[in-house]
Amino acid sequence: MRALSWTTDGLNSNWQKIKKHLESGGKIGKKLTLKGLRHTGASILAEMGYDDRTIADMPGQRTIAMAQHYSRRANRSKNCRAW
């Protein structure tokens, strides 16, 4: 079986179904967005000590600029404790 890329409409349709299910179960808030998830995921990876290239590769970003943008609010100071 060959994996196919999502169309914009297909992704949005499936995201809305998943989001509605999670909202009704009280697992997420109503304001959660895919963009917000990218920011959260990038911040978590940065706080775990992953480099910008790895953070960019996870969601398929071509350059590290967006990874840096998405993870700009991450608290990277705990990665410096070993020094």
Image (cartoon, rainbow, N blue to C red):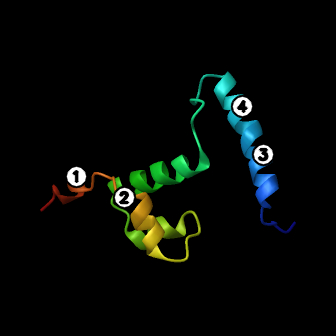
The answer to whether mark 3 and mark 4 are in CB contact below 8 A is no
At 36% from the left edge and 58% from the top edge, which residue is drawn? 46
Q: What label does residue 14 carry, if any?
A: 3
Q: Earlier in the sequence, mark 3 or mark 4?
A: 3
Q: Secondary structure at mark 1?
A: helix
Q: Secondary structure at mark 3?
A: helix
Packing grade of label 3 (10 A; few <14, some 14-19, many >=20) is few
The residue to which callout 1 is attached is 78
Q: Amino acid at mark 1?
A: Lys
Please rate how many residues cluster around mark 4, counting C-alpha atoms within 10 Å: few if below 14, some from 14 to 19, many from 20.
some
Q: Label 2 is placed on what type of residue?
A: Ala
Measured as percent of width and height from the top left, residue 8 is found at 76, 59
Q: Position of residue 38 (x, y in %)?
A: 52, 54
Give the labeled residue for mark 2.
46
Counting residues from the start of the chain, the first of labels 1 and 4 encountered is 4
Mark 2 or mark 1, earlier in chain: 2
- Estimate the spatial distance between the alpha carbons at disc 2 and disc 4, rounded to whole Å: 29 Å
Residue matched to label 4: 20
Which mark is first along the chain, 3 or 2?
3
